[in-house]
Image: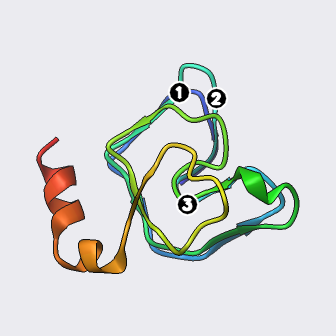
Amino acid sequence: MCGQSYGTVNGCYNTGEVDGDEFVGGVCGWNGDYGTVQNSYNIGTVSGDNNVGNVGGVCGGGSNSTDCYYLSDTSGTDSNGGIPKTEAEFQSGEVAFLLQSK
């Protein structure tokens, strides 16, 4: 959705593969000061070449997120602002319900 954000990212999702160098996220690579990611999700695979601790399911770094979810086995070692959910939880509609109720 965005490489770097200092604003608001709301209601976005990613289903594709995201691969980069560092600060790689399924929805936002870097969420800077005063930025926020909300009501969003990622089910795509996220990977990075360097500093993979900054690979996240939702944000690659600098996190201020609310009500964001990611598929638990698709990202690196640091969620950076997302709540991990299993494939079964996505398929059951739980995540859709959580996002819809916001």
Screen quadrant of the C terminus:
top left
Farthest residue in the top direction?
34
Q: Amino acid at mark 3?
A: Gly
Q: Nearer the viewer, residue 4 or 98?
A: 98
Q: Which mark is residue 35?
A: 1
Residue 24: quarter of image: bottom right
> Percent x, y for residue 19?
72, 70
Q: Secondary structure at mark 2?
A: loop
Task: Name the residue rendered at 23%, 80% in the picture.
Answer: 91
Q: Amino acid at mark 1?
A: Gly
- As measured in the structure, the alpha-carbon distance from the residue carrying label 3 to the one carrying label 1 is 16 Å
Mark 3 Cα-neighbour bin, 10 Å: few <14, some 14–19, many ≥20? many
Q: Amino acid at mark 2?
A: Gly
Q: Secondary structure at mark 3?
A: loop
Q: Nearer the viewer, residue 5 or 60?
A: 60
Q: Is residue 93 left or right of residue 86?
A: left
Mark 1 Cα-neighbour bin, 10 Å: few <14, some 14–19, many ≥20? some
Mark 2 Cα-neighbour bin, 10 Å: few <14, some 14–19, many ≥20? some
The reply to whether dot 2 and dot 1 touch (C-beta < 8 Å) is: yes
Per the image, the residue denoted by label 3 is 26
Q: Which mark is residue 32?
A: 2
- As measured in the structure, the alpha-carbon distance from the residue carrying label 2 to the one carrying label 1 is 5 Å
> Percent x, y for residue 1?
53, 54
